[in-house]
Amino acid sequence: LGNGVVVGAGAKVLGPIEVGDGARIGSNSVVLKCVPAGSTVVGIPAHLVHPDPLQAPRFSYADRLGFAAYGAVSSQGDPVAYAINHMLDHIQKLDRQVDILKQALRDQGILIEDTELPELEDCQIEPEDEPVA
């Protein structure tokens, strides 16, 4: 099973099958073939259903509200991950401010030595989007 997969109650996944990241398997479905990432399968045997064009924005908004089907949210209840994510958000904003200040100083003819910083690519950063009103 990939990351972020939702398997409905009573569903059966039979055989050496891969279920891609973010896929959803409907309740009581019987999966006999691999499920592509981001897709939804239902039925006996399970078959792909074509996504509603409004589905992606709904999932995105639900994620921002902290809602997840079946209450399966990996980030809820982990105060350490919460604190680290907020510190990383803060660092990103500070980095942007420093870049703006450095450019303003360069524009005034003041030379600034660039210091190489370690990358944060492996860190989990969850952007804070403004909720849709």
Image (cartoon, helix red, strand yellow):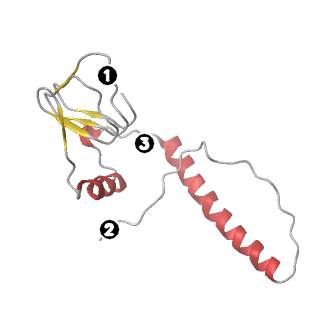
Mark whose residue sits in front, 3 or 1:
1
Q: Where does the image place residue 11, in percent across and percent down from the top left?
A: 18, 25
Mark whose residue sits in front, 1 or 2:
1
- Circles 3 and 2: CB atoms closer than 8 Å: no
Q: Where does the image place residue 17, in percent across and percent down from the top left?
A: 31, 22
| Location of the N terminus (image quadrant) | top left
- Circles 1 and 2: CB atoms closer than 8 Å: no
- Compare residues 122 and 49 and report the one nearer the observer: 49
Report the Cα–Cα distance between label 3 and label 2.
21 Å
Of callouts 3 and 1, the N-terminal one: 1
* Apparent side of residue 30 relative to residue 5 in the rendered image (left or right): left
Marker disc for residue 17:
1
Residue 40 in the image: above or below residue 62: above
* Apparent side of residue 44 relative to residue 87 in the rendered image (left or right): left
- Circles 3 and 1: CB atoms closer than 8 Å: no
Q: Residue at x 13, y 27 (%)?
A: 28
Q: Where does the image place residue 78, in percent across and percent down from the top left?
A: 46, 40
| Location of the C terminus (image quadrant) | bottom left
Residue tagged 2: 132
Of callouts 1 and 2, the N-terminal one: 1
Q: Where does the image place residue 10, in percent across and percent down from the top left?
A: 16, 25
Q: Tell me the element at label 2.
A: loop
Name the residue type under label 2. Answer: Val
Report the Cα–Cα distance between label 3 and label 1.
27 Å
Name the residue type under label 3. Answer: Ser
Residue tagged 3: 75
* Apparent side of residue 40 relative to residue 102 in the rendered image (left or right): left
Residue 1 in the image: above or below residue 75: above
